[in-house]
Image (spheres, rainbow, N blue to C red):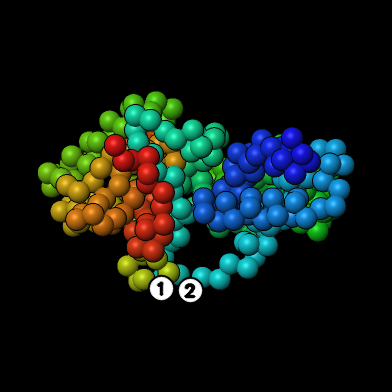
Amino acid sequence: MNEGELLADRFEANRTHLRAVAYRMLGSVSEADDAVQEAWLRLSRRSDPGELENLRAWLTTVVARVCLDMLRSRTREEPFGPHVPEPIVSREDEMDPEHEALLADSVGLALLVVLDTLAPPERLAFVLHDMFAVPFDEIAPIVGRSPAAARQLASRARRRVQGATPAPDADLARQREVVDAFLAAARGGRFEDLLALLDPDIVFRVDRGAGRRASREIRGAAAVAEQVFASRSLARFAQPVLVNGAPGFLVTRGGRRLAVAGFTVVKGRIAEIDLLADPSRLDGLDLTMLDG
């Protein structure tokens, strides 16, 4: 095996870890893959790659820098409502091993929504330290701050995350029962049953794409139940799936993808629903695992 092949093998041994870092940073599998590919290009252009003592740490730093640049350069049309990150959709009976690796820390849509509200340096510090145990003295030069300032960034992000993301029920089967009951009530047009399944303070985020005024955030059980009841005709096209490792559903009609929804179930009731209905991003989702 020549040096180039050896270097490629060493990089591939770290690819899963790097994709996991990038997905948490960017909330998009496709963008995460772009960041990882850029790290490979930078590694392959080095004149002394074999002299890197800790390749994993070096690659993590490179991916983090690339992701930080991507976050800072993101330009979106002024949103009229919430932004739901790109979900990872899998079959209920068999999750893609690569998906499992990306979601090893239960990175639900609700968490990614909150991460998306953080300033890029805060997000980087929180993801690297709290999720991947990277020391602050290694994070500091990436964000251009002192280790103490990097620690403050992570602490500020941690408070926002902990205050905005309810811990879902641990029993996945019970979560599925609740989501299935929700779908059944929607299909049957049973408003009171819908209401009983919703947490009084539920948050329902609907993302139809940048610039679409129909994107909005709805709060409160009654308001959410009314919205679901009004669009109940679409429920019969819903297919149960796993969305970021938790029960959710995919809506397709006539071969066209209409929406994908992730649920957060807390104490037997639905506390959050994150629904992506942006046609351009739905078309880009990898749904190959749903075939067969």
Residue visible at 75% across and 51% down in the picture: 44
- Measured from the top left, where is residue 288 in percent x and y? 37, 44
The residue indicated by pointer 1 is: 211
Residue 249: percent from left, percent from top: 30, 44
Q: Is mark 1 on a helix, strand or loop?
A: loop
Left or right of 241 in this view: 154: right
Please state which amino acid type lies under the numbered disc 1: Gly
Which residue is denoted by mark 2 in the rendering? 77
Left or right: residue 245 versus residue 290 is: right
**Circle 2 residues within 10 Å: few <14, some 14–19, many ≥20:** few
Q: Distance between the residues labelled 2 and 1?
A: 6 Å
Q: Residue at x 81, y 38 (%)?
A: 54
- The answer to whether mark 2 and mark 1 are in CB contact below 8 A is yes
Instruction: Give the percent coordinates (x, y) of residue 78.
Output: 48, 73
Q: Is mark 2 on a helix, strand or loop?
A: loop
Q: Which numbered circle lies on residue 197? A: none
Q: Can residue 18 be seen from the camera position used here? A: yes
Q: Which image quarter is the C terminus in?
A: top left
In the rendered image, which quarter is residue 247 located in? top left
Image position of 267 with respect to 259: above or below: above
Q: For the residue marked with disc 2, what is the amino acid?
A: Glu
Q: Residues within 10 Å of mark 1 (few under 14, many from 20)?
A: few
Q: Between residues 206 and 240, which one lies in front from this camera angle?
A: 240
Give the image location of residue 90, x and y in percent: 38, 39
Q: Which of 269 and 73 is in front in this view?
A: 73
